[in-house]
Structure formats: C-alpha cells, structure tokens
Image (tube, rainbow, N blue to C red):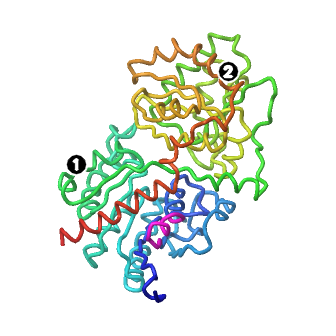
Amino acid sequence: MGKSASKVIMKKLIIVSPHFPPSNLAAVHRTRLFAKHLPAFGWKPIVLTVHHSHYEEKLDWKLQELVSPELQIETVNAFPTGPVRVIGDIGLRGGYHLYKKLLKLIKTERPDFIYIPIPSFYASLLGRAVNIKTGIPYGIDYIDPWVHIFAGSERMFSRHWLSTKLSGLLEPIAVKGATLITGVAEGYFKPVLERNSHLYKQSVYVAMPYGGEPEDHSALKKLNIEPYLFTSKPDKLQLVYAGAMLPKAYKPLEVIFQWLQTHEEINDIELHFIGTGSWANDETSFTIKPLAEKYNLWQSVVFEYPKRIPYLDVLAHLEASDGIFVLGSTEPHYTPSKVYQGILSQKPILAVLHSASTAGEVIEESRAGIVLKFNGESDLSTISELFADKLTLYRNYHSAFDPTRVDTSAFEQYSAFNVTKILAEYLNKAIQKSLVHE
C-alpha cells in the first residue's frame, strides 16, 4: 500500500478562545485539554486567541509548559482597557480582531468547524457572524450559563441588571445558526435549548464535564513545584478546597461552620480554602473569612487564601494536603469531573453534595471517599444531623486509605482523553447536521 493511500486526512477545528495559557483563568483548561487530545480522534485543532499582552489577569508561565509545542496557536491584538477602564471583557476588546483573523484563517486553513467555549460570552457572536459570511458550521460550549439572574439583577440600570438584559438579547443571535451546543453540565445548556426551541432539530447537544489530566500531576515533579500556603501539621487533618465557590454553596458551608462551632472538641481539623476570593488577583477579597469569623473558626479551623494561584501550584497543595474537601450546592449541578483532581492527587475525599449530584455516587462506587448527601436548601438540617457520623467515618477511612484500592475505572469517563472523544464524536454529528440544514 502506498503512502498516499495510508495517509490519514485530519479534519480541522478552529477553537476561538480569547483566553489561553499563559492566562491563569480556569476556563483555559477546557481548550487546552481539548486541543491536546483532538488529534487522536482525527481532528487538527487551531486555537485562535488574544495575545497575552492584553490580558488583565496575572500570567502563569508554568502553565505554558503544559501546552504542546506542536499546537497551532494564532493570536490577535485587542483594544486597550484604558486610560479609563470602561470595557474589560476580552471578547469585546478583541472581538473585531478575532473576527478579521477568523475570516483569514477560514480562507487559508479551510476548517471544517468553528468551536467557541464561553465565557467570554460575547465571543460566541463570532460563530454566527462567520457562518453567515462563509457557511462554516459552528458550535458553542457553555462552560458557564450565559443568561443568568445574578444577585443584584433586580436593581434597574445596575451592572448586573444590564448584563442580564443584554444576555437575553444577544444569546438568541449567537445560537441562531449553531449546529452544536455543549456544556460542562446539562443544566448549563438545557435552558438554552428551551429558550431557542429550533435548536432541538437544528443542532446536536451533549454535556461534557471538565476532564482530569494525569500528565498535569506528573508535571509537578518535573517542574519542582512545592506548596507554600500552609505547612504540614502531624496533629492536624488538613483538608483543601480549591477553586471558586458556587453561589449556592454558602448555605451548606454555613451549616458546617455552625456545627463546628458548637463542637469545640473537634480540634484536629483544618479547612484550607484556596482561590475562593471574589476577585482573582486580590488577596484581600475574602469570601470565606467573614463566615469563619462569625462562628469563631478563623485561623483555628478555617483558613482562606483568596487570590487565585497558578494551576500547577493548586495541584501541589492538593498533593500536600491530608485530604480533599468537596462542597456542592443546594442545586445538583456538580459533576464528578471536579472530583477527579482529588483522585489524581491520591488523597481521600470528604464531600458534602446534593443527593442528585452524580459526583456523590461516583465517589462511593470508586471507594474514593466519604459523602454526606442532602436534598437541597430545604434539607440543610441533614448536614447537621449527619456531619458527626460522616466525620468519624472519614477519619477511619483516612487512616486506612490506600490510593491503589480506589477503583479509578469509575472516573475514566471523566478523563480529558475520554471527554475529548465525546467532543470529536459530536463534532462529526454536527457536521452531518449542518449538511442537512444547508
């Protein structure tokens, strides 16, 4: 058989991701991991992003080490934020430049599909714009819901009120021609389909959680990354919660804090909250500290480091902990993928989750930790009633924990490789769908 006959023809996918490493925003990992694994499924990714010189967040150059040097990355400029910061959103500031570059790439690369993870929400409008002009099919990935009622949205002419109104106007435009709608969880994109019912016939749609990447943990040793926010204490059980707090997770957390206050004999536990601040780069933007102070737990049981730290630094602190603290919310939208980092860190998990969250079931089936389940906001008393028992179970589980006994097969579907496999499958389906609707 000749070489030409055996050559595999790769489809091309342009991923429009205004933020990309060295940006330290959590959403960049979605694109990074998709781009890493797509070639294994017959797709060549091309990442279109805004140049890092236009990012406002602190850059994470160690994260750049996780990006393949073979990945084709195209960068554009963006309008400045100053001298008076009126518009900060990178999708708005870079929108014009991304649009012009996208049209050029379509001519030179002849992509099969355009894929746009959001936020930035405004970047999603690019898919519709180039689809009208070129006919290239496109899809949108909901890392976060766009049309969303924020706290304060009821105040007319406030920033949140304006954002809510604007999202309601722009989202129908952005999704009008989409043939693929995906999201981290079904709850993030199902309302989109309900608001835009034509998408049920026009598009294909699927939930794809964040995928865990074992090689990210291997990079810690190669780069000699060590923890620095806390030191190990042999007489303490140090549990780490890493990442932003879900808005509806504070009520369950308060119940836990209240329980800890009334059980002062529980003096061997420390809860460390990393990257939970209301502003990514502000080390004083505490969200947990006020609650901890209210129940006299601050700096004795509860510690918070609000500023977002580099991704690999987070992994180093997970591995330095005694266990992983997982906290869901009064809503069930908490996916097992968020637990996967704990599994990869080889640490036992203590989870407080909505009973409808599939994360709890996976943790229990895989023997990865102990789960306290409750049924939403009306059932918060369950947390108080069961916390002592679950804490005792966790202590016993922790003392006998052997990471080699964890059934990781339950988590394989949440690996970045297998999540990307789902994306590739639905990209192929979306292309077929677009041919039907031409």
Categorize mark 1 by other alpha carbons within 10 Å: few (<14), some (14-19), many (20+). Answer: few
- Position of residue 149 relative to residue 212, above or below, is above
Mark in the foreground, 1 or 2: 2
The residue closer to the viewer here, 218 or 306, is 218
The amino acid sitting under disc 1 is Arg
Magenta stretch bounds: 35-45
Distance CA(mark 1)–CA(mark 2):
47 Å
Task: Name the residue at 37% across, 47% down.
Answer: 145
Q: Quick check: can you spot residue 327?
A: yes
Q: Specify the label residue 395 is tagged with.
A: 2
Q: Residue at x 57, y 60 (%)?
A: 56
Q: Residue at x 42, y 81 (%)?
A: 105
Q: Secondary structure at mark 1?
A: helix
For the question of whether residue 18 can be seen, the reply is: no
Name the foreground residue: 114 vs 161.
114
The answer to which of 314 and 36 lies nearer the viewer is 36
Q: Identify residue for label 1.
A: 195
Residue type marked 2: Arg
Residue 128 at x, y percent in the picture: 29, 68
Disc ID at residue 418? none
Percent position (x, y) of residue 420?
46, 58
